[in-house]
Amino acid sequence: MSSEPLYLEDTARRTFEATVESVAGDRVVLDRTCFYPTGGGQPHDTGRLRDGTGREWRVADVTKKGDILHTLDGDPPDPGTAVTGEIDWERRYAHMRYHTAQHLLSAVLLERYDAETTGNQLYDDHAHLDCAYERFERSDLDRIEARVNELVAEARAVRWYSLDREAAEASLDPARTRIHLLPDSITEVRIVEIGGADDDHPFDRTACAGTHVADTGAVGTMEVTGRRTQGSAEERIEFVLR
Ligand SMILES: [Zn+2]
């Protein structure tokens, strides 16, 4: 049995009760978890687990390799132990803001420059995004930044839900989601939408298994801090949130 990923539905949840399912070295699998594992350009959560006797472990790393593995400091609890988990909220919330900003930026790059996103990496205090484009001038970066901040100021709703793969493949824009790159084993796709004119016409709709804020207003002011060439016809845009 693999862990129930609580972070997919309720991204604002910080604490949870769980049972240790298995232990391998300093890594434990829980029956359910709020700890986000590294993936999709978003770093893992950190935090702590506690048992009923007051013992506490630091969660230093979280990866997903089939199961979600929590790397702990010190001797891990035995299988069957009931634990309370708590994620470091400041770090996670920053990741949610940056991840949502990345969706806005990707959508604006398509909207204004027909530039598809090819990669992204976010941290809790900066991020970068790669896209298929020749070369941005500073005036382009200023326009991109202004458009993203306009969407932030409009406080658009962000929502997420899962869709079976066939329906997702039939309805997702291939410029926004390279769904054919998902492994065949994925039968349910998580969709993330940023509100548009109405529910049938979202501003952006893509497949993503990361965590996001529920309203673009929470992203904060975005500032493009730089750009660089990532090989031919690929640009990297660097940004921070204030
Ligand atoms: Zn995302």
Image: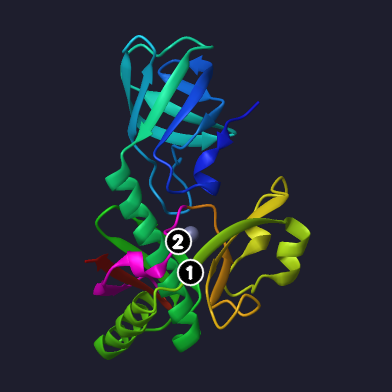
Quarter holding the C terminus? bottom left
In the picture of the structure, the residue carrying the numbered disc 2 is: 214
Colour logic: rainbow
Residue at 53% in and 40% down: 6
Q: Nearer the viewer, residue 79 or 185?
A: 79
Query: Is 235 on the left or on the right of 221, as rendered?
Result: right
Residue 89 % position (x, y) = 32, 43
Label 1 with label 2: CB-CB less than 8 Å:
yes
Element type where label 2 sits in the image: loop
Q: Residues within 10 Å of mark 2 (few under 14, many from 20)?
A: many
Quarter of image, res 225: bottom left
Element type where label 1 sits in the image: loop
In the picture of the structure, the residue carrying the numbered disc 1 is: 157
- How many tags in the picture? 2
The yes-or-no answer for disc 2 within 8 Å of ligand 1 is: no
Residue at 40% in and 28% down: 85
Check residue 209 for magenta coloring.
Answer: no
Q: Amino acid at mark 2?
A: Ala
Check residue 228 for magenta coloring.
Answer: yes
Please identify the residue farthest to the right as the structure is shown: 166
The disc placed on residue 193 is none
In whole angstroms, how far apart are the C-alphas of marks 1 and 2? 6 Å
Residue 215 % position (x, y) = 42, 66
Query: Is 179 on the left or on the right of 113, as rendered?
Result: right
Q: Residues within 10 Å of mark 1 (few under 14, many from 20)?
A: some
Q: Is residue 181 above or below residue 68?
A: below
* Boundaries of the magenta span: 211-231
Q: Is residue 161 above or below residue 8?
A: below
The first of marks 1 and 2 along the sequence is 1
Q: Amino acid at mark 1?
A: Ala
Quarter holding the N terminus? top right
Residue 197 % position (x, y) = 56, 83
